[in-house]
Amino acid sequence: MKSFNSVQATFARIDVEKAEAGSPADQAMIVTAARAAPGGTEGLNAVACEKLRAWTMDKVQWLVARKAKPGERTLVFE
């Protein structure tokens, strides 16, 4: 569980303002669009973090279910 929490903490540090792009012009365009979006860059960071968290949880649950024996209860994360 410690590694899982570390992954979640890493997702929480996502910052679109620090993202890299193929060129400075692309980076400026992306950051400008993110700032103009509803919620600004903080909102976009939160959406990205939540989407990654949900994807990770889905994969963990899939792996746990795959390893479960028939009739055995599986661990469910909320």
Image (spheres, helix red, strand yellow):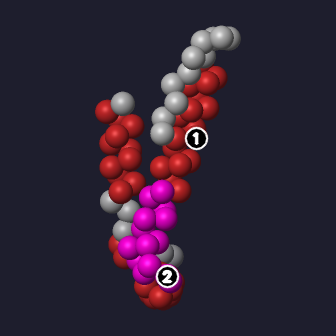
Residue ID at (44%, 58%)? 49
Q: Secondary structure at mark 1?
A: helix
Q: Is residue 14 visible?
A: yes
Circle 1 residues within 10 Å: few <14, some 14–19, many ≥20: some
> Which residue lies under the disc numbered 2?
38
Magenta region, residue range? 37-50
Query: Gap in Å between the C-alphas at discs 1 and 2?
Result: 27 Å
Residue ID at (58%, 40%)? 58
Give coordinates of residue 8: x percent, y percent: 38, 47
Most frequent secondary structure within the magenta stretch: helix
Give coordinates of residue 28: x percent, y percent: 44, 87
Circle 2 residues within 10 Å: few <14, some 14–19, many ≥20: few
Name which residue type carries label 1. Asp
Q: Quadrant of residue 42?
A: bottom left
Residue ID at (53%, 56%)? 51
Give coordinates of residue 9: x percent, y percent: 33, 49
> Which residue lies under the disc numbered 1?
58
In the figure, is residue 4 to the left or right of 21? left
